[in-house]
Amino acid sequence: MEPFDYREIILNKLKHIKNSLEKNEKEDSSHILLEIEFIKNLAFELDDFEVLGMASKLEMQYSEAFNYYDDYSFLQESLPSYTYTQPSNRRLFYKTIENVLYQSNNYEIDMSVYQEEVERNKGMLIDSGNYNNLSIYTKNETATRKVHDKVKKELSSVRCEDNSYIIPSEAQIIDTFNKAKMEIYRLANKHVANQIELAVMSSEPNLNKT
């Protein structure tokens, strides 16, 4: 039996939803949004921030296209077993953050230092089977998406008593971004170094044979 490929199945599902959105096919909206919510929760539990970011972006695009930002009551009507309640100011919360993060290139993550390190050790990383994964890991877009998701997650962790979002100020968004950026760099320093060290160790037996 072939191993279960979580990412392939999830990415194919997101691609199908994206294609339906682009073709303006309104299918069963309650189930579509519920599926996206399920994918987001699963990706979060697995620390798959790339899939989480893709699903979150698609959710916003789909909701905006069909005007479902502020009304998730249809989920309870069509699927009464679910008790998901959408905060009324969700759209304002995410738009406030995006208006800051997407207003300039200042809020993109520069991973060029790590990309250069990966390329310097390309041969060994290819031999160890880690080159492709590290190449994706060190992409600016991958790191930027992770940081933006961390910002949204951090700022959404504290709510009002009615579960509505607390709309952050620009200063709060920038401060949270800077902290998340430093954390991404800290993790990248450790992860890239570890992968290169493992590649060096795996190549040593081959060097000794020559």
Image (tube, grey):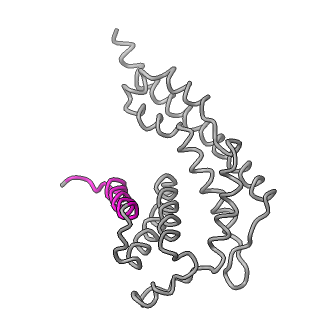
The residue at the far front in this view is 24
* Left or right of 25 in this view: 171: right
Observer-nearest of 34 and 30: 30
Observer-nearest of 163 and 120: 163
Q: Position of residue 205 (x, y in %)?
A: 38, 19
Specify whether residue 207 is painted magenta.
Answer: no
Quadrant including the C terminus: top left
> Over which residues does the magenta segment extend?
2-22
* Left or right of 118 in this view: 149: right
The residue at the far top in this view is 210
Observer-nearest of 171 and 205: 171
Q: Is residue 29 above or below residue 59?
A: below
Observer-nearest of 204 and 22: 22
- What's the residue at 32%, 57% (across, down)? 12
Q: Position of residue 1 (x, y in %)?
A: 18, 55
- What's the residue at 64%, 43% (across, down)? 108
The residue at the far right in this view is 171
Q: Position of residue 51 (x, y in %)?
A: 46, 56
